[in-house]
Every structure is written in C-alpha cells, then in structure tokens.
Amino acid sequence: MDVALSVRGLRAYYLTSHFGVEREVRAVDDITLSVEKKEIYGIAGESSCGKSTFIRTIAAAIRPPLRVLGGSIRYSFLDRDLYDLDERALTDMRWKHLSCILQGSMNVLNPVRRVRESFKDFASPHMGLARSEFLEAVKAHLKRLRLSPTVLSAFPHELSGGMRQRVAIALATVCRPEFIIADEPTTALDVVVQKDVLALILEMQREIGSSMIFVTHDLTVHANISNRLGIMYAGRLVEEGSTRDILRDPMHPYTRHLIASLPRIGDVTPKKGLSGAPPSLADPPSGCRFHPRCPLAMDICRQAHPELTALAPGRRVACYAISPLVQPAHDAAAAHQATKADKSAAFLQ
Amino acid sequence: MGGLLGRTRFAAIDDVSFSLEAARPEIFAIIGESGSGKTTLARMILNTLAPSKGIIRFLGEDISRFRGRREQLQFMRKVQPIFQNPFEAFNPLKRVDRYLFASAYHFAEHHGRAGREAAADEALKKVGLSLAEVKGRFPHELSGGQLQRAAIARALISSPALIVADEPVSMVDASLRMSIVNLFKTLRDELRVSIIYITHDLATAYYISDRVLIMQKGKVVETGPARHVLSNPQHPYTVLLRESILSPDDVDKPHLAGAA
C-alpha cells in the first residue's frame, strides 16, 4: 500500500478584515485523506462545499486572503511538507511531478498566444530536450490524444471546447507527472465530447501510472472514473469509500440523498429535492454542518461535529445516526479558535 | 455572422416544425448539444429574434406581426422565459423583489403597492419561497437554487400559458435540481402551464417530459413521446446521445478506456 499523497488535518480559510469586519470563511476545515499510488480518488460535492479551495491548497496555488492554517500535505515525490518548499522548488515541481487539468481550459491556455507557446512555457523547462526534439515529443504526445499537430499553431479560441480540453490534458501529461489534479474537467462539455475526454484522461492516467484527485459534483462521472470517492459538504469530508460502495450502499444522509435523487433513463419513480441550501462557510451551522437539512438530526448533531470514523476497512463516515462508533471530533472545540500557525506566510511577499 | 470583411450565412435552424396544444398542457423537451440551434429556437419562440423563413403562431396569431407595444405586451404576458444562469438574468445591483414588482405592474396590472406585494408573494409561494425570504435582498444573497426559483416565480406572475425554459437547472446543484424539475411538473399539472424545456440533459428530460424533440446542427432528427424516443432511439444521432450518457450504474461495468 503505497501512498502518493497524504493530507492530515488540513485547514484553509479565507480571512478578511475590512472596515472593521473580520470574516473567516472556513472553506477547508480539518480534512484528512490519503491517495494511493496509481489510484484515482474522486471528490464529490456541490457548489460552495470547499472542493475548489481544497484543490488550490494541495496544488500550492493559494493567495491571500486564502491561508493555510494547519495540517500537513505530503506528496511521495517530495521529502518534506508541501508548504515547506520555497518558490523555486515549487516551480520545479509544477507540470513535472504535479500537474492540473482544470475546468474551462482557458484557465491554462494563454488566449493571446498560440498553443505551442504554452507547451514551451510549461513543459519545455522540465524535459531538458533540444527545441526540435521537444516539439517532436509534443507532437507524438498530441497524436496519442487524437489531436493533429496543427493544433500547436492555433490560438485557443480557434479550437472547439473539446479540443481545448484535450490540449489541456496533453499539457498536464506530457512530462509524465506522478500526480495529476483534475477539477471539473468535463463539466462544460457536451455529452458526447465528455465521454471521449474522460476516456482519454483515464487512458493517459493508466499509461503514465499517475495518481489522481478528480473533483466533480457529477456522481455519474465518478461512477466511470474514480476508484474511491470522498464526499465533501461545507468544508468537510462526510463519507469515504470505494466508488461502488458509495453508489450502491451510501451511508451518510447527504450522500443517500444525492444518490437517490439521480435521474436515470428508464426510471420514472418520483424523486425528491433536498430542502434548504448548502450553508455559508462564513457562518456555518454549529456541530454537524448538515444538521439543518438532515432528516435524522439529533441534539448531539447541533452541538459537536462528528469525527470521520472508519466503520469498515476503507469506509469512513461522519454521522452519529449511522453508528455508535462515531464520536464528536476531539478537536471540535479547538476548531473554533483557528490556530494561528499560518503556514502560508513563507509565500507571501 | 462575420464582420466587415467577411460574411458567412448558415442556417442556425433549418426546417423545424412542431406544435403544442392549448387545451393539453405539456412539458416539451428540446434536446441538443451546443450548436444545435436550441437557444436560437428559444429566442424565436420568445419573439426576440425573427425567423428568416417560416411562421410561428401563438394562439393562432403570427407573432412576427404584432403592431405596437400593446400586442407585444399581451404576448409577453402569455409566454415567459427562464434562463440558464440566474446570476446573469438578474442585475447584481438590483434587488430581486423589484423584478417581481415590475412584472406585477406591467403584466398583471397591479398599480398599488399592496397589490404588487400580494402578487409577488403569491407567485413566490407557488415555488416554495415567500416575499419575506426574498424582500430587500440582492441576487448574491440568495443561493443559485433560490434565485432560479425566484426567476420562475417572476415568470408566473402574469399567469402565462407557456414558459420557455433554457437549461434551467444546469447551473443548479444536484441536491436542489430535483425540486425545480418537480416544480415544472406541478406547474403543468396544477397551474396548467405548458413548458418548453430546453436541455442537453437526457436524464431529466426523460424524467419529466411528455414529448421530446432532438436537434442536431439546426435540424430535427427525431421527435415523439419522451419515454418512447429515449428508451428506443431510432436516429443514429439519438442513439449516440443515449449511449454517451453516463449513469451511476456504470460503476458495475468495465471502465471507459477501451470504449471506442
């Protein structure tokens, strides 16, 4: 059991102070998880659950007012915590050992430069090849992704959404990184293109042997791509298990609801929506953050948030109603006073 | 399209025909991917875009022949839109209740404050909200799901016969999606409103639609009763769409890689 990434007790908040008003948005609040080598670990959650903040934190792509306040992030290819690296070491690592495939590939591709320049900027420094060899290697790689080499001379807007996303995948995989982070890579794409792009991501991941964290709110995508799944709600992980276990036998009431409400072709049984809305992370509910919308809420749920507890090997749930083994998190009281161990201070100019 | 130096004409919509009956409210889904022409079609039905050829008739009247604001307003009372992104549909600097009051004024002719507030409250209650929750609030103070429901409430104030909903739930969270989709059913069954549901999501279309129309590159490729077409697609494009849908049941099948 080889671990590619180990995250322990991660806490990252947006801290703002304007006009005398202090605000603390607890976007990532005490997350602990491990990703094994060569596995795809899926993270599912809805808008404002903190998953994008989590991605930014593990990619070391944070900026004030987002600050990492506690916890550790250890990648297998680094000999120290991610936040103990200096800027130079981080640049060395990006694209070569750790890369990202993001939603809306425009985020990665410079709109006013041809595609080839993005490859030169990001990948060339890591591959250490002469210019012509480098371009040949890139063209061969593009071919694997069923892209014509002419794509290199194009501007991003000249390519369709699906093609741009495949270019983004090419960029993220050309240096054969150990770890790839994907954040909603197929959400904006048409249904037919989506299937194609997902198949490509999977093919690339298998060929290179990378480990992945794949973030999307879409559970049907997870069914097709993720080995294991972590469900995020309001900044916390509420359930974790193999994708099959979670989809076939969900335990946490939130997960159960998400899965029960999925429409399927061939199924006309009435589905229900969940009342209320995902909570504001600036002022989350006390105790378990799901309790205002939970059909099983009890007194203890309002008082202290439950620890994400292993109920079986590889299966963790944070819900008192599911098992008496689940106890209040031991740092539930301390969590309220966010520690001032501001780990991101090293990055701020 | 094109600018000063080059101009290309292509048919965004080519030979599309269908009709809905007033006496039988239904949910009519128009399914297509980007570039299929579905949004162009929506704009033409709402009379914000004129067809190059062909006629759109509402209650027997050709909608391109309205004379004057009055006739246009009559039409707008009866045919109302809901758009994909409620945060784009609402001006971020304008309080949400003002939209409801404006609709009450223009379309339901409530000229007094009390009348407008009552109309707004009544419409909001139909979508599971209330004026008290929404009053005085700006769009960013509501969640995506609440804002979209407010948009639907606004559309209901004039007691429309038809609502044209363009991707109404694609930006709404999964846990809230079903409550809006179920709301459409209620609108059809209890308020007798027909809904043209434009979407690329076959699963929700299957769940609530009575009939579907599948579009590809501006043309209709298949149409018919929803369950029938989506369970037994005939046209190759519909078959392709159907096969491309991902399902939670895929977890038991061999993974994607290795698929064509």
Image (spheres, grey):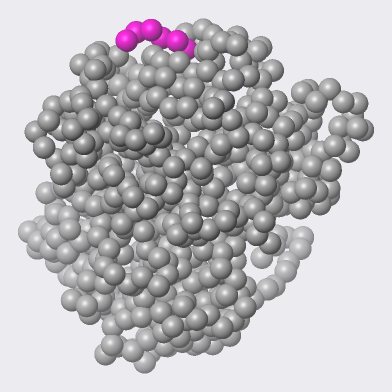
Residue B164 appears in view: no
Point 63% across, 19% down: residue: A77
- Based on the displayed image, in which of its 4 quarters is residue B148 positioned? bottom left
Q: Is residue B10 above or below residue A252?
A: below
Point 39% across, 14% down: residue: A70
Residue B43, magenta (yes or no): no
Q: Is residue B196 above or below residue A271?
A: below
Quadrant for the C terminus of chain B in the image: bottom right
Q: Nearer the viewer, residue A80 or B171?
A: A80
Quadrant for the N terminus of chain B in the image: bottom right
Total label count? 0
Prevailing secondary structure class for the magenta stretch in the rendered image: loop
- Based on the displayed image, in which of its 4 quarters is residue A318 positioned? top left
Is A166 placed left or right of B84 in the picture?
A: right
Residue B141 appears in view: yes
Q: Nearer the viewer, residue B103 or B131?
A: B131
Q: Percent from the top left, x then y, of residue A296?
A: 15, 44
Residue A342, magenta (yes or no): yes
Q: Nearer the viewer, residue A296 or A47?
A: A296
Q: Percent from the top left, x then y, of residue A326?
A: 23, 30
Is A349 placed left or right of A161 in the picture?
A: left
Q: Percent from the top left, x then y, of residue A277?
A: 25, 45
Point 40% across, 65% down: residue: A264
- Magenta range: A339-344
Point 21% across, 51% down: residue: A275
Q: Percent from the top left, x then y, of residue B111?
A: 13, 64
